[in-house]
């Protein structure tokens, strides 16, 4: 019942393809009716909710397909390939894109840990991954509906927007992705902090030792925990982040040399070789309409 109300609310607000602001910071509605193959993208900390159709993300050979049964929670910046391969006019993709505010999520995670105690995982468990799928529960559904019901009333949004968004964040932290989110934003968030550090320095030379030192770990421990959290080694992750960002810039119209320099490549020939090795096309062959990229990211 709650899901149906959310779907009807979204359908009443958007009638054409694209990403649309709701007036609440970081909350957007989207609609896609074109089948778009998976393409390089970078997921920032976000929750992506589907109410109709299916969406797909690929990470290191793992395929995440999610629909109205599960929402996707990304707790750290992740280089992925994303698309809407089954979207059509008869079966449009409809959903909500909710950015996770680091400050608010950290406050909530800390409050939860001070109340319920720090997260304790069995010794045999690995760290939760940066991407996870969560089934809707009543708390999440209710908080999402209440958030979207603010609508276009600027007074309601101004007065209630932050509190209802905080309520949704709390529902995520309590849900199936809660452990992953609390590890990213609460105590023991070293890997998330190292990724944030790296993401802000893609145009600079960053070493593994520098990242490990930044979060106070030995190189070996950092490497192990990083791979458990992201499914990639730090070097693989850095390369994917740089190339995915470059692919998105090129697709949006930036020339190849500028895109290469923007993500830290000094040698254009090295950039072209690594780009083609990853995507099967040279940078000059890489073009997709900007509006499609915005829809799938």
Image (cartoon, grey):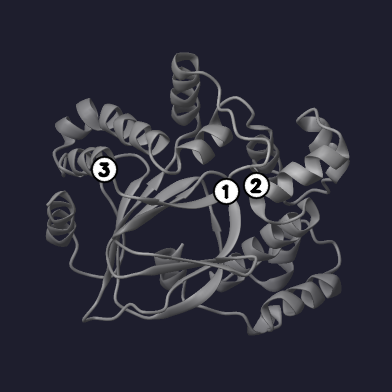
Label 1, on which residue? 130
Residue 140, horizontal then vertical, whole percent: 28, 41
SS of the residue under disc 1: loop
Q: Residue at x 51, y 74 (%)?
A: 38
Taking depth in this image into account, of 247 and 117 the one nearest to the observer is 117
* Residue 41 picture quarter: bottom right
Tags 1 and 2 touching, CB below 8 Å: yes
Q: Which mark is residue 23?
A: 3
Mark 3 vs 2, N-terminal side: 3
Taking depth in this image into account, of 52 and 26 the one nearest to the observer is 52
Q: Which mark is residue 156?
A: none
Q: Is residue 113 above or below residue 16?
A: above
Q: Residue at x 51, y 78 (%)?
A: 288
How far is the residue under mark 1 from the one under mark 2? 6 Å
SS of the residue under disc 2: helix
Taking depth in this image into account, of 15 and 290 the one nearest to the observer is 15
Q: Residue at x 47, y 68 (%)?
A: 293
The label nearer to you, 3 versus 1, is 1
How far is the residue under mark 3 from the one under mark 1? 28 Å
Q: Is residue 29 above or below residue 212?
A: below
Residue 46, horizontal then vertical, whole percent: 45, 47
Q: Is residue 96 above or below residue 246?
A: above
Residue 101, horizontal then vertical, whole percent: 45, 35
Residue 84, horizontal then vertical, whole percent: 40, 73
Mark 3 vs 1, N-terminal side: 3
Label 3 neighbourhood size at 10 Å, few (<14), some (14-19), many (20+)? some
Label 2, on which residue? 229
Taking depth in this image into account, of 207 and 49 the one nearest to the observer is 49
């Amino acid at each position: 019942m709650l899901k149906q109300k959310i779907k009807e609310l979204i359908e009443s607000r958007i009638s054409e393809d694209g990403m649309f602001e709701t007036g609440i910071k970081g909350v957007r509605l989207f609609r896609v009716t074109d089948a778009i193959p998976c393409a390089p993208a970078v997921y920032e900390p976000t929750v992506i909710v589907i109410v109709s159709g299916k969406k797909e993300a690929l990470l290191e050979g793992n395929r995440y397909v999610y629909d109205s049964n599960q929402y996707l929670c990304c707790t750290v910046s992740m280089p992925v390939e994303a698309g809407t391969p089954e979207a059509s006019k008869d079966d449009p993709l409809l959903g909500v894109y909710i950015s996770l505010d680091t400050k608010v999520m950290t406050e909530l995670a800390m409050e939860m840990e001070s109340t319920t105690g720090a997260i304790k995982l069995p010794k045999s468990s690995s760290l939760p991954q940066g991407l996870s799928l969560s089934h809707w529960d009543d708390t999440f559904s209710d908080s999402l509906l209440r958030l979207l019901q603010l609508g276009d009333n600027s007074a309601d949004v101004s007065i209630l927007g932050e509190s209802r968004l905080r309520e949704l964040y709390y529902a995520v932290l309590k849900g199936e992705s809660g452990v992953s989110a609390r590890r990213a934003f609460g105590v023991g968030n070293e890997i998330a902090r190292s990724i944030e550090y790296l993401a802000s320095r893609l145009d600079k030379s960053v070493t593994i030792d520098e990242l490990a030192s930044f979060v106070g770990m030995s190189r070996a421990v950092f490497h192990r925990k990083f791979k458990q959290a992201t499914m990639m080694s730090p070097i693989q992750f850095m390369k994917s982040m740089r190339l995915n960002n470059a692919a998105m810039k090129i697709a949006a119209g930036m020339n190849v040399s500028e895109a290469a320099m923007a993500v830290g490549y000094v040698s254009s020939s090295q950039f072209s070789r690594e780009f083609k090795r990853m995507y099967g096309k040279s940078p000059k062959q890489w073009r997709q309409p900007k509006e499609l990229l915005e829809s799938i990211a």
